[in-house]
Every structure is written in C-alpha cells, then in structure tokens.
Image (tube, rainbow, N blue to C red):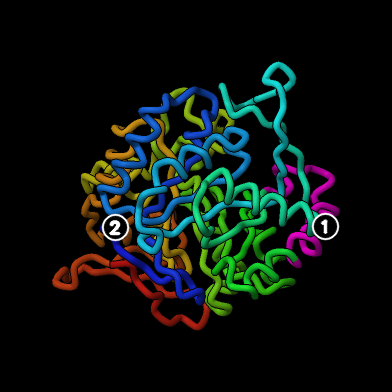
Amino acid sequence: MNPDEKRKFGRTGLEVTAFAFGTAPLGNFLHEVGENDAQEMIGHAWDAGIRFYDTAPMYGHGLAELRLGQALRWKRRDDFVLASKVGRVLHPARRADIDFTPWSNAAPNTMAFDYSYDGTMRAFEDSLQRLALERIDMLFIHDIDRFTQGEAQPEVFSQAMDGCWRALERLRDQGVVNAIGVGVNEWEVCYDAIRQRDFDCCLLAGRYTLLEQDALDRFLPLCEKQGVAVVVGGGFNSGILATGAVQGAKYNYAPAPAPVMERVARIEAICHAYDVPLPAAALQFVVAHPAIPTFCAGTRTVAQLEQNLRWFRHPIPAGFWHELKERGLLREDAPVPVADTADPVMFQAQAASGGSSASPAP
C-alpha cells in the first residue's frame, strides 16, 4: 500500500493521499518538539509524497498552524490539501496567565470553546492568518463529543448544529472551503451529525481500528450511501496497536485493561506467523474501507514518520486477514486490503449491506 497514493475524497472533488500528516505533536503535545525538527518532519513528509495535512487551533494554542503554514507557504497551493478546525477561538495573552496543559511551551494564546456563527467565522479567519495561506480546503467542527464535553455534550452538539453549521454551510456555498464536517472521538456523534446536516466528511479518532469495528453497524454504511468521506486518526488506539501487549501499554489514553491486552496478544501471534508488524496491520486495515480514503498520523521525529511510512508500505498477505476473521479477531464484514490479484488466496470482505463486495484498497 502506497502512502502517497491519491484517492478521491468522497463527493467533494478533492483528492488526498492515503497517508495524511497530523500536526498535533507540532503543537508540543505533552513534550516539546524543536522548531528545526518540526520543519524537518513536514519537509520529509512532503518529499515522501504526502499531500494531505491536518491541523487545528487547539494544537499548541495555534503553534501547529503557525509551524505548518511556515513549512507549506512556498509550495504551490494546488499541490496539497489542508484541513483545520473550528469550535475554539484563541485570544493573545501573557504566558504567565495561560494554563498550557497538556501542551508544552505553546503559543501565547488562551483558548475558549465557541460554536456560535460569529465564533466559527472568527476561528476560520484567525486560522487563515496563522497559516498565512490563501485558503483552507476543509473545516471540521472540533470536539463536540462526550469525551470532551461530558454531560454538556447534547447542548454543545445542538449549538454546533446551529451556529457552526450555518457558518460552514455559507463558507462552502461561497466556495471559500470545499468540504465541511465534524472531528470527534465517537462515531455515534459523527452518525448523528451527518443525519442532521449535509456534511461532506468526518474525522474520527480511534473508533475504527483492528480492535474496534462497531462503526460498521450504522455509521460507515451511511457514509457510503451519502458519499461522506472519513479521515481516521488514532488508529493505534492511543498506543497498544503500535507497542503491542507490553507492560504499560495504553488503550484510549489509559492503561490497557486485561481483555484488550489478551486480544492484542492473540492478534500479535498471527502477526508473527505471517511476518507482519502489528502497526502495519493497524494502519493498512483502516484505509481498506471504501468510505475511508486516508489515515492521519502525527509523529514527533523524522524517524517515527519514516517508520510509519514503512509500515504503510509493508506487504501483507491475504491469508493474514483471513485468519484474523477465522479466529474471531476481526469482524467478517470488515473490508480488508486485497493482495496481489495473482495470489490464489486473495480474500475480500463482503460489505455489511447486501453482501456485495466492498471496494478494495490497492
């Protein structure tokens, strides 16, 4: 599977690379990334053919947008696709007055949720200024999920479906952005959003992985029906699908519980039998679904980025996916990458609806 392969982004007319560069680490998430390292990483991604970049005002209180814009500023604008987010407005402030948690040495701005029409327009215009680029191709309404909003989620969701939606719909109608959507941690929130409003895309963190396929029940079939493109991030479930079932492995930002550790260990055993790195399987599985044209990953170093790209390219025999299903470690209706057509054991999953073959990833 080639990370630089261009894929259609749903119904939007955009094309994105199968691997997308995520910029949360460039905002100094948990640990600081040096300026030179940040620019080197973006440059390395560009040289590897990656042409889809995702950022957000939240990442480092604007720092990730500043860094990404600096790196892309002199590229031909039509050569890449850029996504950012709305839902937070930043205000300049003294560093001493800012709680940067969980960011380290971020940009000197405070952040406040704002899902109103005016706040959305303000967030969009501020992002354009930080990036110093002439346009943003897609905008996601950020963090209107239970993970972020807790008990206030229903009210916040309702506000976003009014204020944010009206602003984004206007920007799309004016041709200022090509695609609008929501970026959250729960597929159910995406599902509710695309049922209520005419969104083009969703960014879903961690809820469609080798460990979790409940999104196949309702959400992904609806995306296929409506032509909604899905960007998946968090494909390692915050760690365990990259590290394996080792002591201290993280699952959804917390120590992995025993049942998850046991399931990952069983998947790893099949990985060893087929000489497939667990992270390679995790990356490639996600983009085999016809509604998911791209996987978004953030890295802290060039070495990490290059490792992700190698995992993305690693050949995986069709028998590997077949055995995962035979052993009940992967849903039968989950689309999987298709091996070389000369392979006599080529396996292709059946789509959840109607039993027709799902469109394979190359």
Majority secondary structure in the magenta region: helix
Residue 334 coordinates in the image, percent (x, y): 44, 65
Q: Which of 125 and 327 is in front in this view?
A: 125
Identify whether 160 is placed above or below 217: above
Q: Mark number for residue 4?
A: 2
Q: What x and y, as percent, mark residue 107? A: 59, 29
Residue 68 in the image: state x and y as whole percent.
Answer: 46, 42
Bounds of the magenta segment = 143-166
Q: Residue 181 carries which label?
A: none
Mark 2 residue crowding within 10 angstroms, few (<14) / some (14–19) / many (20+): some
296 vs 92, left or right, is left
Three-letter amino acid code at disc 1?
Gln
Q: Mark 1 points at which residue?
A: 159
Give SS at disc 1: helix
Specify whether 6 is left or right of 86. Answer: left
Circle 1: is it few (<14), some (14-19), or many (20+) Cα within 10 Å? some
Quadrant where the C terminus sits is bottom left
**Where on the picture, by quarter, is residue 42?**
top left
Q: Which of 11 and 230 is in front in this view?
A: 11
